[in-house]
Image (cartoon, rainbow, N blue to C red):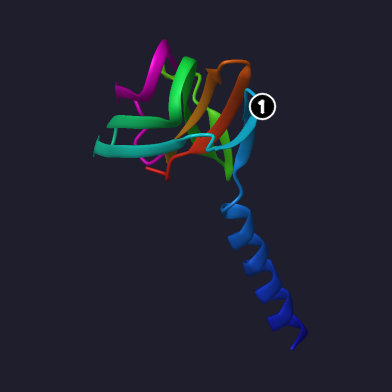
Amino acid sequence: MKKKISVLLMVLVMVLSATVTSYAAVGDEVMPRDTSSVDYIIDRTSGTSADAEVWVTFSSEADEYSIVVYLQKQVNGVWTNDTTNSDYVCYKNGINSRTVVFTNTYDSLTYGTTYRLMVVSRDIKGSSETRTTTYSSPF
């Protein structure tokens, strides 16, 4: 019985935390502001290559943004940046945008190794700055 209550409580906390939004002041008004949504489309085209498309959408047009995409590999159960790959870190910076699309083909992947992308996005709207880190599903 205690285990069921513990599991139920844990599920409830996870569900409620998933619906949390941050707030930013705009003038004298406080408005809800989603950090961003990040969508991944990744195709492991072969054992040593993958095509990746990352869509970062801000809740409103960002005055300025910076997106950094890291290629990570799993080694002994731990995720680390794959510094052996020349494309292990890629940047995309810009201004006045609501949606940013990042595309890249990752070559020279190690056959049999599991990878994922880590995306760190930063957007500035007025004097408010939001940073978000997300991870793709393993590929």
Characterize the local packing of mark 1: few (<14), some (14-19) or many (20 or more) Cα atoms within 10 angstroms: few
Q: Which residue is at 44% across, 38% downward?
A: 37
Q: Is residue 122 left or right of residue 30?
A: left
Q: Residue furthest right?
A: 2
Q: Which residue is at 55% across, 18% downward?
A: 124
Q: Is residue 120 left or right of residue 25?
A: left
The magenta stretch is 89-113
Magenta-drawn stretch, dominant element (helix, strand or loop):
strand
Q: Nearer the viewer, residue 100 or 34?
A: 34
Whether residue 26 is situated above or below residue 47 in the rendered picture: above
Q: Quadrant of the C terminus?
A: top left
Q: Quadrant of the N terminus?
A: bottom right
Expressed as whole percent of the image width and height from the top left, the position of residue 129 reads 61, 21
Q: Which residue is at 40% across, 30% downward?
A: 56
Q: Which residue is at 30% across, 30% downward?
A: 53
Whether residue 6 is situated above or below residue 87 in the rendered picture: below
Q: Residue furthest left?
A: 45
User: Three-letter amino acid code at disc 1?
Assistant: Asp
Expressed as whole percent of the image width and height from the top left, the position of residue 93 reads 44, 11
List the residue tagged with mark 1.
28
Residue 54 sits inside the magenta stretch: no
Q: Nearer the viewer, residue 104 or 34?
A: 34
**Residue 7 in sight here:** yes
Quadrant in the picture for residue 11 = bottom right
Q: Nearer the viewer, residue 2 or 28?
A: 28
Q: Count up the numbered dots.
A: 1
**Residue 49 in sight here:** no
